[in-house]
Image (cartoon, rainbow, N blue to C red):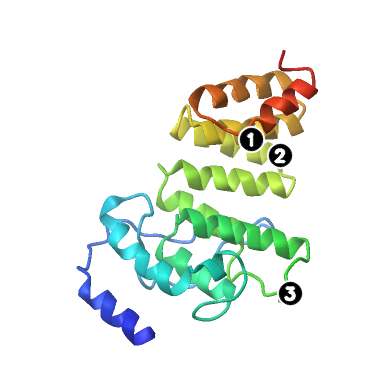
């Protein structure tokens, strides 16, 4: 399989990488983020010019089994996620899978307690630094911070995501849910109405606000 990957890579045109993907920031314990060196890539998940290279990484390292934390493809699950995110720092599905993997670890829901090669918050900061106009990476960091109880930090990242991509219904929906947790109901109503105006999100949020007596 590795020989096939090498042959496939050799057949692709080699791009000139203008962007780099250094490790930046610090983990939640205050330690400087660090990880393995760059191999294949880095490619931007949102750029059309990089898209031909991404399926190769997915085929060999980001299979459904890896995404759903069933088993690794070329090695361990953390190893395959690490390879994917080093090659494609802002790969949306890989970032979300890494977040969910860490949350399962936190809640002792994994049979094998193998830690991620690099803290998930470091993958997220690297993704944002690598592709600062990609609002999904920013909103995923907000989602992770919310899940671990860092609500104030989460709010700032949702606000930043909406600066990058105003009127995004998914981000507005998620931000409204966070505002409910913070008991900022008027503001939650404001962003909930924006979400339903700009998209067709599930009715759960509206029903929640009706139950709270906010949406009348």
Crowd class of label 2 (few under 14; some 14 to 19; many from 20; radius 10 Å): some
Q: Nearer the viewer, mark 1 or mark 3?
A: 3
* Circle 3 crowding by C-alpha within 10 Å: few under 14, some 14–19, many from 20: few
**CB under 8 Å between callouts 3 and 2?**
no
Cα distance between the residues tagged 3 and 2 = 29 Å
Q: Which mark is residue 124?
A: none
Viewer-side residue, 209 vs 174: 209
The earlier-in-sequence mark between 1 and 3 is 3
User: Label 3: which residue?
Assistant: 111
Q: Residue at x 62, y 57 (%)?
A: 99
Percent across and percent down for residue 3 are 33, 86
Q: Name the residue located 79 percent from the left edge and 17 percent from the top edge.
A: 213
Q: Position of residue 146 (x, y in %)?
A: 69, 44
User: Can residue 35 be seen here?
Assistant: no
Q: Position of residue 165 (x, y in %)?
A: 45, 33
Which residue matches tag 1? 155
| Relative side of 40 to 65, left or right | left
Name the residue carrying label 2. Answer: 151
161 relative position to 184: left or right: left
* Placement of 71 over or under 194, stated as above or below: below
State the separation of the CA atoms marked 2 and 1: 6 Å
| Cα–Cα span, label 1 and label 3 | 33 Å
At 36% from the left and 55% from the top, the residue drawn is: 44
Label 3 SS? loop
Looking at the rendered structure, the secondary structure element under dot 2 is helix
């Amino acid at each position: 399989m590795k020989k096939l990957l090498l042959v496939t890579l050799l057949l692709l045109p080699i791009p000139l990488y203008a962007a780099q993907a250094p490790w930046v920031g610090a983990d939640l314990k205050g330690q400087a983020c660090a990880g393995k060196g760059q191999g294949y890539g880095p490619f931007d998940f949102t750029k059309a010019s990089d898209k031909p290279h991404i399926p190769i990484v997915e085929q060999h390292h980001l299979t459904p089994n890896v995404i759903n934390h069933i088993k690794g493809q070329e090695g361990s699950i953390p190893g395959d996620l690490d390879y994917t995110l080093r090659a494609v720092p802002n790969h949306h599905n890989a970032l979300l899978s890494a977040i969910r993997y860490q949350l399962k670890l936190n809640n002792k829901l994994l049979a094998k307690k193998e830690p991620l090669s690099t803290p998930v918050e470091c993958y997220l900061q690297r993704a944002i630094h690598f592709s600062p106009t990609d609002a999904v990476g920013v909103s995923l960091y907000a989602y992770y911070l919310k899940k671990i109880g860092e609500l104030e930090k989460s709010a700032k990242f949702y606000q930043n995501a909406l600066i990058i991509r105003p009127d995004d219904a998914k981000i507005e929906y998620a931000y409204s849910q966070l505002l409910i947790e913070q008991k900022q109901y008027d503001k939650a109503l404001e962003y909930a109405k924006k979400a339903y105006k700009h998209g067709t999100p599930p009715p759960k949020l509206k029903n929640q606000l009706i139950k709270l007596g906010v949406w009348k």
